[in-house]
Amino acid sequence: MAEKAATTERPYRDEAHAINARDVRFDFASVPMHYIPGEVLATHIVNVMHLVLPEGERAMAQCLAEALPHIDDERLREEVQGFIGQESMHASSHEGARKHLQSIGLDVDSYVSKVAWLVDRILGGHGLTGRAGEEWLKERLGLFAGMEHFTAVIGEWLLNANILAEQGMHPAMLDLVRWHGAEEVEHRSVVFDAFQYVDGSYARRARTAILATATLLPLFIVSTAYLYKRDPSEHKGRSWIRQFVSATRRGVIPSWTVFFTEMPRYLRPSFHPSQLGSMDTALRYLAHSPAARAAEH
């Protein structure tokens, strides 16, 4: 399945470091329901990023594990294995945040369980083997490569959104989302490279990218609406539309238009994820993340 792609020269040379899971420790004990003060809707949009989307990342890691037997390139295999390790650490770290929010009154678990079930039903391996299994693996890799483009873009935004600190976002949650965002930038190329190696069809890449966009945007909208509705606070405000417009205008949340403005870049035949963001910024943050330093001690 990888004969043609196996001889393709790797498209970058400036990311020679190894991708590995990092041991991190977060203390969520003092995190309030609205950990971005005065920003109820923005808090729940961030909740979607780090409580709901990891369910898709879990399925993505499983897909890459299934792709490993088809990858002979030593460097790419190393990156895929590192990616799987990082996603596992993301899941355990976000689980801690999810349990804390659940304990202070936000019903997160029931919704996340429904999302996990849906992801498995749609993007699981379904026990397919032979030619059907190979084709479905390629399709899933294409979908996940498209989704990873957006997580890398959002990760870059999280690293550079100084307004979150200026708004007084709780340090533990700020570190959680920035650490996750930095690793999204760090491993931004892995799923794309795995797809190119195993399949590499531009037609499939374009089609699955459009499907990924059509999936993620409704997921963000439905998930945010659910979390906002389940928020038990008496003073969360009635006009979520006004909050959304205000938060977007002030840059407290990324613009929803990113789901459309990023597609032309991803669909360029010459595009490669290494063109996204600043690897130096991501690695510098990962070297100084409070959670990483806490784990060292």
Image (tube, helix red, strand yellow):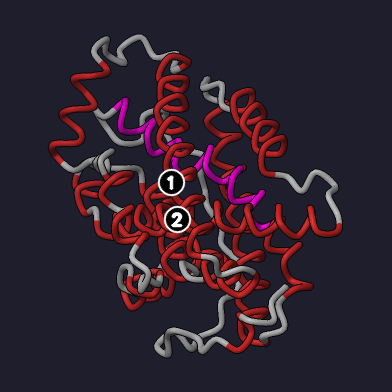
Kind of residue indicated by mark 2: Ala
Q: Compared with residue 100, is residue 210 higher up or lower down, i.e. above or below?
A: below
Q: Which residue is drawn at 44% across and 84% down?
A: 11
The reply to whether the C-beta atoms of the residues labelled 1 and 2 are less than 8 Å apart is: yes
Query: How far apart are the two marked residues, 1 and 2, measured between alpha carbons?
Result: 6 Å
The magenta segment is 40-61
For mark 2, give the secondary structure. helix
Residue 297 in sight here: no
Most common SS among magenta residues: helix
Q: Residue 206 carries which label?
A: 2
Identify residue for label 1: 210
Vertical position of residue 130 compared to residue 106: above or below? below
Label 1 residue SS: helix
As for residue 45 lying within the magenta part, the answer is yes
Q: Nearer the viewer, residue 172 or 261?
A: 261
Is 204 within the magenta?
Answer: no
**Which is nearer the eye, 29 or 3?**
3
Mark 1 crowdedness (10 Å alpha carbons): few <14, some 14-19, many ≥20: some
Image coordinates for residue 188, horizontal then vertical, percent: 46, 67
Q: In this view, does 223 lie above or below 49?
A: above
Q: Position of residue 3 (x, y in %)?
A: 69, 82
Alpha-carbon neighbours of circle 2 within 10 Å: few (<14), some, or many (≥20)? some
Foreground: 127 or 223? 127
Q: Is residue 56 left or right of residue 210?
A: right
Tell me which amino acid carries mark 1. Answer: Ile
Can residue 126 be seen? yes
